[in-house]
């Protein structure tokens, strides 16, 4: 099959590429830049120049493919997170429009936090609250509307995805610790973040895409929850900086835009995903990847 992969140069997308190539697929990869196009060619991917803001370009990419995996997302400025989630909604609508009237699958990306149930407890695949306060719900609402219109849409929800170079939002916490001289957490730091190694995540995308199950929601979660305090203490140890507890009222001043996330309890289950896909993550845990990271390298 020929698969249009958005975000093909990104952390997650570039790990999905070899999974797809190994399965005998051809990959058409979206990128905004000439440097991205060169990187894709080196990886065995045919570049498709375009942006998330250009629905015609997205439609053209999808129209040339037997299916689409959408991992692109504008992370350039997290203070624009709400607007960027809305941009993602429009991109999903454009990709879906090109697939309408066919059974060609569209696999989109969301965050594991979207599955958190009202009454607390780990996020679950079968939880889909249209009024969820997390702005990323925009991506899933766009997918749900396409599904109702007959497009074969499924969703992969991601936790903190990690290797020894990048670790989702934790990469920004490391950068903040370097700049402020402390590795901080909020309150007692017992709040948890779900996590998964990037290569296991990539394998899950390939499995989910092959399954083509319209309406399925998958959680690429290897560790249900790693305590924020353990994360902060590991970063502190590795950077030789103190780990400090901050009162919730002091979080905004220290963490800036990260304050919206850092105190959240975001555990997530992948029990249904494992049963449905036979997916069994085998990579290292988040703390071990943080311990093995080379902190003398400039931030990713
Ligand atoms: N990494 C995590 O821990 C994590 C956690 C939860 C959810 N997610 C979600 O998982 C997906 C993949 O994340 P990631 O970590 O791989 O992101 P990333 O490393 O920041 O890569 C972003 C990708 O999106 C593309 N992109 C960004 N803005 C674009 C735009 N305006 N137009 C077209 N392409 C654009 C980039 O392509 P070019 O620069 O080549 O144009 C790049 O390939 C995203 O939806 C993200 O929100 C990730």
Image (spheres, rainbow, N blue to C red):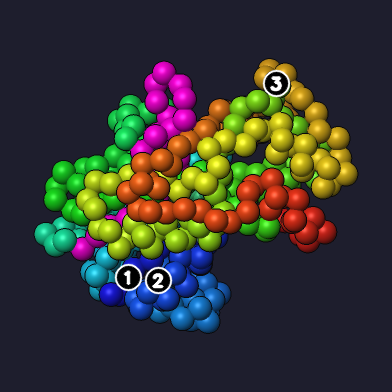
Disc 2 element: helix
Q: Position of residue 63 (x, y in %)?
A: 23, 69
**Cβ atoms under marks 2 and 3 closer than 8 Å:** no
The residue nearer to you, when weighing 253 against 153, is 153
Vertical relation: 240 (above or below) 298: above
Q: In 3D space, how far apart are the residues under numbered discs 2 and 1 (Cα atoms)?
A: 8 Å
Q: In 3D space, how far apart are the residues under numbered discs 1 and 3 (Cα atoms)?
A: 45 Å
Specify the label residue 3 is tagged with: 1
Q: How many labels does the image show?
A: 3
Q: Position of residue 73 (x, y in %)?
A: 46, 53
Start-end of magenta stretch: 104-125
Q: Position of residue 30 (x, y in %)?
A: 41, 68
Q: Nearer the viewer, mark 2 or mark 3?
A: 2
Is residue 111 one of those drawn in magenta? yes
In the displayed structure, does residue 27 sit left or right of residue 228? left
Q: Nearer the viewer, mark 2 or mark 1?
A: 2
Residue under numbered circle 3: 187
Residue under numbered circle 2: 20
Vertical relation: 150 (above or below) 268: below
Q: Residue at x 49, y 45 (%)?
A: 221
């Amino acid at each position: 099959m020929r698969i249009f992969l958005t975000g093909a140069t990104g952390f997650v997308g570039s790990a999905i590429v070899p999974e797809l190539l190994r399965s005998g697929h051809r990959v058409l990869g979206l990128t905004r830049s000439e440097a991205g196009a060169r990187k894709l060619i080196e990886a065995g991917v045919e570049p498709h120049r375009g942006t998330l803001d250009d629905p015609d370009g997205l439609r053209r990419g999808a129209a040339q493919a037997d299916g689409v995996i959408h991992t692109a997302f504008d992370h350039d400025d997290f203070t624009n997170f709400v607007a960027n989630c809305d941009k993602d909604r429009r991109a999903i609508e454009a990709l879906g429009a090109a697939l309408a009237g066919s059974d060609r699958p569209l696999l989109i990306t969301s965050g594991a936090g979207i599955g958190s149930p009202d009454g607390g407890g780990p996020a679950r695949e079968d939880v889909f609250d249209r009024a969820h306060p997390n702005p990323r719900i925009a991506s899933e609402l766009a997918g749900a509307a396409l599904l109702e219109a007959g497009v074969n849409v499924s969703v992969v929800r991601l936790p903190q995805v990690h290797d020894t170079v990048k670790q989702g939002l934790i990469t920004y916490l490391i950068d903040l610790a370097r700049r402020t001289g402390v590795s901080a957490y909020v309150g007692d730091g017992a709040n948890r973040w779900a996590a998964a190694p990037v290569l296991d995540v990539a394998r899950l995308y390939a499995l989910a895409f092959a399954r083509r199950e319209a309406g399925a929601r998958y959680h690429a979660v290897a560790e249900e929850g790693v305590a924020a305090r353990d994360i902060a203490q590991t970063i502190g140890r590795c950077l030789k900086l103190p780990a400090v507890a901050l009162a919730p009222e002091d979080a905004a001043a220290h963490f800036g835009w990260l304050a919206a996330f850092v105190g959240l309890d975001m555990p997530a289950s992948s029990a249904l995903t494992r049963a449905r896909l036979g997916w069994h993550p085998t990579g290292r845990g988040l703390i071990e990847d943080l311990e093995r990271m080379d902190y003398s390298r400039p931030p990713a």
